[in-house]
Structures are given as C-alpha cells and as structure tokens.
Amino acid sequence: MSAPISSPAPRIEPMAAESPLTGFRTLLYKETLRFWKVSFQTVAAPVLNALLFLLIFSHVLDRHVTVYGEVAYTSFLVPGLVMMSVLQNAFANSSSSLIQSKITGNIIFVLLPPLSYREFYAAYVIASTLRGLMVGGGVLAVSALFVDVPMANPLWVLTFAVLGGVILGSFGVIAGIWADKFDQLAAFQNFLIMPLTMLSGVFYSIHSLPQFWQDVSHFNPFFFMIDGFRYGFFGQSDTSPWLSLGVVSLCFVVLAALTLAMLARGYKLRS
Amino acid sequence: MTVLAIRIHGVVKHYGALQALGGVDLEIGQGEFFGLLGPNGAGKTTLISALSGLVRPDGGSIAVMGHDVVSDYRNARRNLGVVPQELVFDPFFSVRELLRIQSGYFGIRNNDDWIDEILASLDLTHKASANMRALSGGMKRRVLVAQALVHRPPVIVLDEPTAGVDVELRQGLWQFIRKLNRDGHTIVLTTHYLEEAETLCGRIAMLKSGRVVALDTTANLLRRFATHSLRVRLADPARGVEIGGVAGESGWVDFSFDSYADVETLLARLREVGAGLAEMQLGEPDLERVFVEVMHRA
C-alpha cells in the first residue's frame, strides 16, 4: 500500500456545534415548516373535510339521536371528528414526509448529519403531533362557532389528543420507512388507519351497536383514543377513561419501542 | 503523530450473496486529493456510503479524522461532507433555507456569513432565495456541493460530482474544489472521467469487485502500468501489422512500447519491411490506459 501523502496545508477544524439539541430542533423546525408551507393542503383542507362530515351528519341525525341520555348528536360528533382529524393528520405527516424523502432521495440530508435515531424519531413524531393538533384545533374552533361543545375536563382532552398524535405519528414513521412506493403507503392508510378510525366510535356510541360489535370495538385501540378524548368533553364515555388511558399509553410505549428499534437498526434507511 | 483523514481497515460488506466490499484497506492523509476509481459495481459508492454511515459494514472499521464512524459517529460525521452522486433536493425550500437547515443539523445556527461565502464561491448568490425546483441541473449540483460544505468539514467526498455537468460548470467546480484542497481540506473523488482524476488527484486507488487492486501516487501508476504509444500512417499498413502493429482507419497503425528507447528500433523495423512512413504521432501514457491495464490484470 502506498503511504498517505501528508499536506503542508493548515489543519481544518469543523465548525463547533452550539448545543447538542440544535440538530434535533432544526429537524423539528424543518418538518414543521414543510407542512406549514403547504398549509392549505395539510391544515385547511382536512379542517374543511371534517366540517363537511359535521354538516352532513348533523343535518341528517341531530333531531333523531341523543347520546349519553341528553347530549345532542352534533355535540357528541364534534370531539370524534376532532380526534379523527388529529389521528389521520399525524399519520399523514410523518408517513408522507418520509416516503417523499426516500423516493426523491433527499432523506440523505437527514442521514448524513450527526443526528441520533432518537432525535430523528422525536422530531418526526413531534412535528406530526403538531400538525394533528393544529388540524384538530381548527376543527374544534370552527365547530364551536355553530355547535355547543362543553369541555368538562380539558386535561383529559389534551392528554388524549397528544397521545393520539404521538401514536399515529409513530405509526406514520413505521409506514413511511416500511413502504417503498406511494401505493404501499396508501394501502396502509386506506386498509388500516381509515377503517380503524371510522369503526372506532367517531360517529356513534358503541352502546348503539350489537353486543358482538361492542366486544370487537374493544380490540380497536382507536376506540380508546376517541372514547377517552370524548370523556374530556362530556365527563361521560362508553368505557372507563382510566382504562382508555391505560390502553392508549400501552399502545404508545409499544409503538415507540418498535419505531425506535427500527430506527436503531437503520431498517430500510441505513442498509 | 498526525491523524489520518480517513482510515479504512478490513471493511467487508455483503448484500445477500453479493460481496460489495471484500476487505478494503485504505489510508488517506490530511490534505490529500485522493481518487477512488473503478468500473460500475466495483464498490466505490458502497465504500463512500460506509464512510458516511449510510451503509453498515459487516466487518472492519472506518475512522474519519480519528473518529470511528460507528462508535463515535457524531464526531466522524461533523468532520465529513459528502456530495452525493444523485441530483437530489428538497422541493419545499429555497437555497438559503436548505443551507440554514443543513447547518442546523450539524448543530450550527447563525451561519449566514459562511453560507454567503459558499454561495458566492459557487456563483449561487443570485439564486439564494430561489426554490430548488426553479434551478437548472447544474445549479442543483452546485447546491449539493454547498450543502456538503455548510459545516466546513475537513474531509470532503465527491461521488461523481461532474456526471452530466457541462464543461464550463465542470471547470468552475474543479477550480473551487482545488482551492478547498489548497486551504487544507482533504478531497476524496470518485469519477468516471479519468482525465479529471489524472489531473487532480495526487494518489489513486482502483477498486474491482470490492477490492483495492491498485493504490499508488498518480505519477507512479502512470510509470508502472501505462505504455507509450506510437501511431504511424503507412503507405503499406499490412507491413506494419506484420511487425506487431494494430491496424486503424485510413492507413494508421498503432504500436505500444515501454520506453522511448524502443522508438528507434520500431522505426528501423518499419524501414526494413518497407512500410513507407507518411505521418507519425507519439502518445503520452494516460490514466485511461493504466485503468484498462489494471482492470485487465486484476
């Protein structure tokens, strides 16, 4: 082997990092800016979609259905739609960002810098949660102009909204890393996320279902996210909010662990 | 003892049954302009990817400026800038936004002075506010170089940076890279343009099937492997072929020889066989011949 040639040129030092958190904060900022730059598509459009659901269902059912004894159907529906928006948009954010970056190849700009897999996870999931909360907040704010929506316990509302956003943000990271093509991601969204959301009690109380389907609903973690979230509004729910909190927290821990394990291994990112 | 810019020791990488790297050893000193050459599939990009943490080797170790790329990846990556082969970009951002974001990933904020300097050096100042989608291919390529330099890394890897780039941009890019090298940056270059490697690189490694098959200074490689060539146009080309020439078009015949002393003998033989010399061109040894010879022997 020929020996390396030493150069008389001065030794170059890389620029010093200002803070160990700057890399993470920058990735979070970039992921937030990414959806904010197209907020008409990523925030305004989902808010409008949810409001259309509200308009149609309230027009058809409001005079015919009450829930928990005296809650008007439209009031009952609003938290469900808010949480559905949080969940779907949190998933859409991380999954679409990752698959776009993978397919266009610009994921390399995140993989080359000295970011740890934990920072990677936290930035993508927090940005997704922020988008989910922004859309959910938008749906709630506009709905509140037309519908009486009580909020019995805001802390429960916030806890379930954040946990739901974090869980679906993690789910989005898994889907975005796993999928190699947009149609694989669409399959994930259409055949898993959408049915689980729609059949989770967004539009109905599970007590209105036959016993068999009530039992089946208890195997759907999305049911617990929405039921716990709804408890924060009405102080009533289909099942104990503590049980919901337990199930949702367990889901978060399992999904976070799975996502972190994938990232630590570099699954489909670092071959 | 001076720390090596890059130390690669026994690096092995398999993709299923395919061996992409079969125990590569390389040492590159600080301030070198080093060429990594090889045919397609030789393992150049895999080696660069292993160096930059995009690929995890099955065995061996790699260090950048003394920092192991696995156990001390943060410091290794801070010391390394990579210009990728593919023309990739993030369509959501302007050039300046991208460079600020890239700085931030490396822990550096308020880096506009250095960003401005890079933009000016790469003639991109007037495009700083333009969205990446609005740039030409050549400009996108320059932004890729800027992104790799944004944290001022001592070691810069350029993976085929001039593929599909026009001559003017190529010249400008090399002037800039040469200046970086003069300033003390270590440059590692992969390219299929062998004349570029010959002109720029002080030392060259050639890879074939995941192994280093030649490693030396460019001058030594040219001396060791390349033969000189004599091109003659003959009145009777068949006579030239009889004494070992290779027939070309329009009466031209090519001869190879090892040293200039052989020219005399060759011309004497042409006269002996009555080939009728009409024109003559002497060819210098070049890296392309070395490359072909090394790949043939390996």
Image (cartoon, coloured by chain):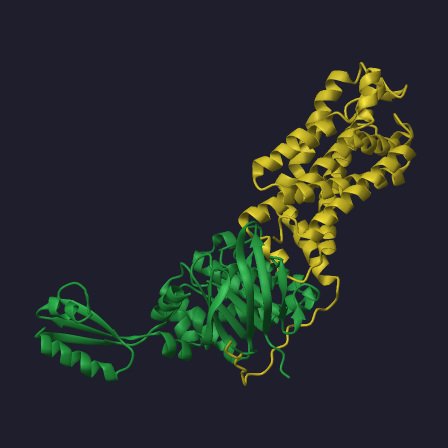
Chain colours: A yellow, B green
> Image point 39% across, 75% down: which residue?
B199
> Image point 57% across, 72% down: which residue?
B155
The answer to whether any part of residue A13 appears in the image is yes
> Image point 79% across, 18% down: which residue?
A62
Report how many numbered discs are placed on residues in the image. 0
Nearest the viewer among A57 and B244 is B244
**Dividing the picture into quarters, in which one does residue A88 lie?**
top right
Q: Is residue A81 left or right of residue A249?
A: left
B80 vs A186: above or below: below
Q: x%, y% of residue B233? A: 14, 71
Q: x%, y% of residue B207? A: 47, 65
A193 vs B217: above or below: above
B114 vs A96: above or below: below
Q: Indicate the quadrant containing the N terminus of chain B: top left, top right, bottom left or bottom right.
A: bottom right
Q: Is residue A263 left or right of residue B133?
A: right
Nearest the viewer among B38 and A85 is B38
**Dividing the picture into quarters, in which one does residue B104 lie?**
bottom right
Q: x%, y% of residue B106? A: 66, 64
Q: Indicate the quadrant containing the C terminus of chain B: top left, top right, bottom left or bottom right.
A: bottom left
Q: x%, y% of residue A81? A: 75, 30
The answer to whether any part of residue A38 appears in the image is no
> Image point 72% across, 39% down: which residue?
A135
